[in-house]
Amino acid sequence: MKSLSGDELLRIFARFGFTKFSQRGSHIKLRRQIPGGGRQTLTIPLHREVDKGTLHAILRQAQRYLAEEELAPDFFVE
């Protein structure tokens, strides 16, 4: 798994239509609207380097909304 910062995660998820919804301390909630009025939410820590365990948790959370094949190039070293 790549080493990623919170800013890099924001850029990755922005490509999939997520935008900043709210912030509390160093954690940002990202949200995107889907057709039919549904909402999808992710929480991202704005750390210089996000811990590997936290990255795995974010990846699992994101896979509820996005295909693993779409996320893999950004999260894993080839």
Image (cartoon, grey):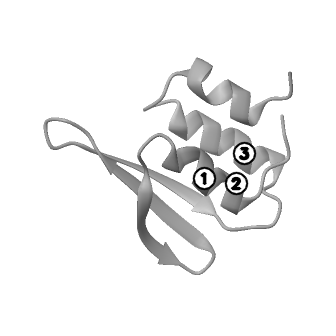
Q: Amino acid at mark 3?
A: Leu
Mark 3: few/some/many CA within 10 Å (<14, 14-19, 20+): many
**Residue 11 placed where, x, y %?**
60, 52
Quarter of the image with the C terminus is top right
The residue drawn where x is 51% and y is 78% is 24
Secondary structure of the residue carrying numbered label 2: helix
Task: Choose mark 1 or mark 3, whichever is in front.
Answer: 1
Q: Which mark is residue 55?
A: 3
- Quarter-of-image position of residue 19: bottom left
Mark 1 crowd level (few <14, some 14–19, many ≥20, 10 Å Cα): few
Q: CA distance from mark 3 to mark 2?
A: 12 Å
Q: Nearer the viewer, residue 41 or 5?
A: 5
Decide: is 62 above or below 33.
above
Q: Is residue 75 left or right of residue 40?
A: right
Residue 30 higher or lower than 75, as above or below: below
**Which residue is under mark 1?**
11
Q: Earlier in the sequence, mark 1 or mark 3?
A: 1
**Residue located 79% across and 50% down the image:** 4
Residue depicted at 50% across the width and 50% down the height = 14
Residue 28 x/y as whole percent:
53, 67
Mark 3 or mark 2: name the one nearer the start of the chain: 2
- Residue 30 marker: none
Asked whether, in this view, residue 22 is left or right of residue 55, the answer is left
Tell me the amino acid under the disc marked 1: Arg
What is the quadrant of residue 57 in the picture?
top right
- Three-letter residue code for mark 2: Glu
The spot of residue 18 in percent (x, y) is: 43, 50
Q: What separation in Å lies between label 1 and label 3 (alpha carbons)?
A: 15 Å
Residue carrying label 2? 8
Helix, strand or loop for disc 1: helix
Depth-wise, is mark 3 or mark 2 nearer the camera? 2
